[in-house]
Amino acid sequence: MTRIEENRQIALRKLFGARNLPFPHGVTSVCSAHPLVIEAALRRAGMEHRAVLIEATCNQVNQEGGYTAMTPADFRRFIENVAAATDFPAERIILGGDHLGPNPWRTLAAEEAMLRAMAMVTAYVEAGFEKIHLDTSMGCADEPTALDDELTAARAARLAKAAEEAALRSGRRPPVYIIGTEVPPPGGATHALEEIEITRADAAMKTLAVHRASFAEAGLASAMERVIGIVVQPGVEFGNTDVALYKPERAKSLIRSLVDMPGLVFEAHSTDYQPAEALSALVDGGFAILKVGPGLTFALREALYGLDAIADELAGKTPRTGLVTTMEKIMVEQPASWAGHYGGSPDEQRLQRHFSYSDRIRYYWPDPRASAAVGELFSRLPEIPETLISQYLGRLYSDVVSKRVAPKARELCLAAVDAVLAPYSAATASQ
């Protein structure tokens, strides 16, 4: 066993705790709050007899509600309700908090933003989240956009102390931690991608060293022992219209640095849209935690839009209202979640609203009008002809004709998400 393989086992055993399941080669982190995405992830984990890691971000879920209007306790109930309906054991669900830090409040003064971040971390831990990514690298009001390593680590230690105290008060198992800054922007880049700058090995080592020093100064040596991974940039990212693919040869120096980080792995963010061989290479290289989110809802949107086109074909005409029309209306009326991410001409922005890899449309599915439009679409499609599935949902056609997937709208949506999850399962499976 190599040192990297040994590190992987140590880190994942800390993450998985006492769960008596086949030991994985890596783990997929499903970052979504869409019920169909969650159901698809639970179905796959159930079929493979594996645990499932589901994460919420600081902007998505926090003590003030986030853009989902869910607190951490609400999110846990939401996930457990989907699990109950799917007959998936709740004890095999690992919940994680991503980018937990002052990001949602970075327009405030630093101390006020940090106090809210500490309250958020407390709420996550009290709700039973077991994996906490401490991300304090962003500047707040009157600060630089990016902070130096020492201040970032000192603030991370403050959040870890709040998490440790919350676990002790609530009788929860103390969480494991991820440290380091996410280099790919949350949700993907907003610019065209060229050559991605990979994290230098010495930078990764410094991240570990400054956090270790800050944790020690805060009296958190036992918490530092539960740090299982570092967020680095291995060269993967996606923008609105393009994807930077992983090239293992470019990350060799970074991978070698894991030999000097006993018990740690790397966490890879923005792995959406990577081909199967790239995902496998990432895990083999020590990036044992693969985060995916927009790629899952992108596939779901593809399926929903294909079904919308099928419904029009079956009706023999294009209705004046439909899912695509409804979503465009909602997004134009409420531009806050896309306007700062999509540029260009009005026509270019319209295409990006619906078809960008960054999938900002995912913020709008909880809108009651969107939910009603999806429900109405499903009701129009009790059973779908195979020929129309071939035309509009070609990636699912072979599964339908072989009877692995029923030609029903909801099942086709779940199958579309599962098709994205499948190569992640292969890359992280027990070996």
Image (cartoon, rainbow, N blue to C red):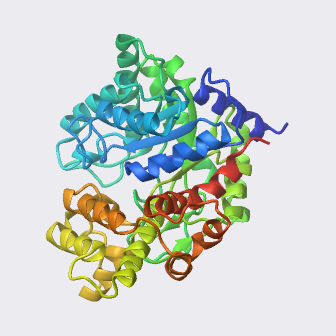
Residue at image x 58%, y 69%?
396
Splitting the image into 4 quarters, where does residue 368 fall? bottom left
Can the viewer see residue 174?
yes
Residue at the far left in the pictured view: 333
Horizontally, residue 6 falls left or right of residue 89, namely right
Q: Residue at x 24, y 34 (%)?
A: 63
Q: Is residue 210 left or right of residue 99?
A: right
Q: Which quadrant of the figure contains the N terminus?
A: top right
Query: Could you tell me residue 165's position as x and y percent?
Result: 36, 16
- Picture residue at 53% right of the left edge, 17% below the top: 222
**Rendered residue at 22%/44% (across/down):** 69
In terms of depth relative to the viewer, which is nearer, 143 or 290? Answer: 290
Residue 275 drawn at (x, y percent): 64, 66
Residue 159 figure quarter: top left
- Let me know if residue 184 appears in the view: no
The residue lying toward the viewer, choosing from 117 and 33, is 33
- The percent position of residue 317, horizontal first and vertical second, equals 30, 88
